[in-house]
Amino acid sequence: MVIYLDLFLILIATIGLGLGAQRIGLPVVVGQLLAGVLLGPSLLNIVQISHSIDLMAEIGVMILMFIVGLETDINQLKANIKPSLVVAFLGAVCPMVGFYFLAQAYHFSPEQALFWGVVFAATSVSITAEVLNEYHQLKTTAGATILGAAVADDILAVVSLTGFIAVFGEVSGYQQPLWLQGVLAIGFFIGLYLVSRFILPTFVRIATAMPLPAMPGLVGMLLALGAGTAAEFAGISAVVGSFFVGVAIASLPQAHKMRSETVAIGYGIFIPIFFASIGLKISFAGLADKWGFLLVMTLAAIMTKWVGSGLGAKLAGLNNSAANVIGLGMVSRGEMALIVANIGLEAHVINRGIYSDLAIIILVSTIFAPIALRKVLVK
């Protein structure tokens, strides 16, 4: 019964603060993030993260990325593959190098310092994609580059994390050989290509024509969750699978109807819960004793990704305005960095104290990203 009250409070808060953020010219997602901060342990402490909320949040981010995939212009994504890879590479290398030396300056062990770099090399595209979508920037050069770079970053983070845990971790479940992890990831993309080329068009046409209520939306949910599950099995973030299956069917005649119904399902409950769940994980306990450390690390989280990704965009030939948008668009770490941090905790690479510090820095930088991005998109 508690879960019903929690969901009621989350939805009320995300609606109210989302409207409030929109009223003062901020992205709706900022209000939804702050709804979680308000209800969670940071302030009112009346809603706690539970298995049920986590599960609904995971579904929400997969639906969100599926919708983003449906709205992505695959030709523009291909056209921006070179800048995407350059942005992804420098956007991962700068945080890894910067945090390694910075964490060692704060007397962390070499392996813990390296783990700080692995965590902040990750990028979460979901929040940035929502802001780009809200301001109709997904199909611009900068938007396509950010999406491509974030996917490449995700793959780089998975490879780095797999190698790191294989060397330093203590949990057998995360000690698969690096070559096997690579084979599974490559197999996933080959399988997705073959399925999308030879099976999905016929499946979508037949399934959406079935005389059942809301079939296009249900088929969209099926594809988003199915591709996300397959991606996780291959050791890739579920959001990558959901995103790419959306891209794969974006040009089908049924895609428009599927998008409108999937949007109704996702934004009606799951996506607001996902954004609120990020805010729910923030705790300010003991903050007064280490605010200086957290401030320095938060600034590093923002600047290493902003400068690294922006420099990559400049080296790839983009102008200053696009490079600035791309740099800011890659700052958000969100669920991907939290997943990496959680795996490190379970593998006993870090303790709960370090995990809490990581979570606060990740979440503060995640809230910063959409606010700053809005400033450069709306002039």
Image: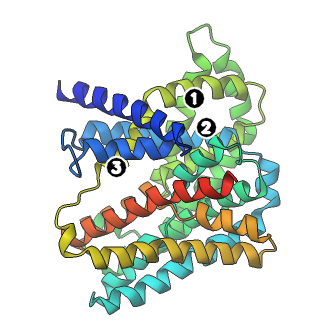
Drawn side of residue 111 relative to residue 264, left or right: left
Drawn side of residue 197 relative to residue 326, left or right: right
Residue 267 is situated, as x and y percent measured from the top left of the image, at 50, 30
Q: Residue at x 48, y 41 (%)?
A: 21
| Disc 1 target residue | 263
Q: Residue at x 52, y 75 (%)?
A: 303
Q: How many marks?
A: 3
Residues marked 2 and 3 touching at CB (< 8 Å): no
Please tell me whether mark 2 or mark 3 is closer to you in this view.
3
Residues marked 2 and 1 touching at CB (< 8 Å): yes
Helix, strand or loop at disc 3?
helix
Q: Residue furthest front?
A: 24
The residue lying toward the viewer, choosing from 209 and 128, is 128
The residue under label 1 is which amino acid type? Val
| Disc 2 target residue | 67
With respect to residue 22, does 341 lie above or below?
below
Drawn side of residue 156 relative to residue 170, left or right: right
Quarter containing the N terminus: top left
Helix, strand or loop at disc 1?
helix
10 Å crowding of disc 3: few (<14), some (14-19), many (20+): many
10 Å crowding of disc 1: few (<14), some (14-19), many (20+): some
Helix, strand or loop at disc 2?
helix
10 Å crowding of disc 2: few (<14), some (14-19), many (20+): many
The residue lying toward the viewer, choosing from 38 and 335, is 38
| Disc 3 target residue | 279
* Residue 195 in view: no
Write down the quadrant of residue 299 in the picture.
bottom left
Q: Which mark is residue 355?
A: none
The residue lying toward the viewer, choosing from 329 and 52, is 329
Q: Residue at x 40, y 46 (%)?
A: 33
Report how far apart the C-alphas of labels 2 and 1 lie in the structure.
7 Å
